[in-house]
Amino acid sequence: MNHEDAVTRLNNQIDHIDTLESKTPYSHEFAKWHGDTENLIDEIFDDETRYIDDFKAIYFTPLFLSCTTDESAFREAYRGGLEEARNFLLFLVEELE
């Protein structure tokens, strides 16, 4: 894959984040986006396993759960994870350019 195609495909994944904000980390749409993004990173940076490891390290659910963890903690963690993913994918675009 050439750099231009890689940048275009990464930007498509970044743009798709906006549509995921109304979903949950357990939705089919999120699972597909996450898997597709993981595969894309692996395809583009096959010799740089740290990039895929960094993407996999992004949390979309709370790190710690307790009996007082409410729905807002899940929403906040999900939105935070999406924003972290957006920033990470933007970083990858910069790496390619």
Image (tube, rainbow, N blue to C red):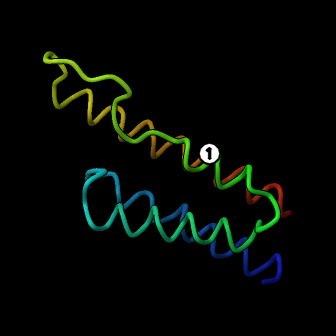
- Mark 1 is on which residue type? Asn
Q: Quadrant of the C terminus?
A: bottom right
Disc 1 secondary structure class: helix
Q: Which residue is mark 1?
A: 87
Where's residue 51, x and y in %?
Answer: 71, 52
Q: Is residue 60 left or right of residue 97?
A: left
Does residue 70 lie above or below 2 as drawn? above
- Judged left or right of residue 5, residue 96 is right
Q: Name the spot of residue 9 as percent of width and height, x first.
A: 63, 75
Quadrant of the rendered image containing residue 7: bottom right
Does residue 67 sit above or below 47 in this rendering?
Answer: above
- Vertical arrangement, residue 53 with respect to residue 77, above or below: below
| Quadrant hosting residue 42 | bottom right
| Number of residue marks | 1
How many residues crowd around disc 1 within 10 Å: few (fewer than 14), some, or many (20 or more)?
few
Res 28 → quadrant: bottom left
Residue 30 percent location from the top left of the image = 35, 61
Name which residue lies at 50% across and 42% down. 83
Which of 77/49 is in front? 49
Residue 61 in the image: state x and y as whole percent: 34, 37
Which of 89 and 40 lies nearest the eye of the viewer?
A: 40
Q: At x 21% / y 18%, what residue is drawn?
A: 66
Residue placed at 35% from the left, 58% from the top?
Answer: 20
Q: Quadrant of the N terminus?
A: bottom right
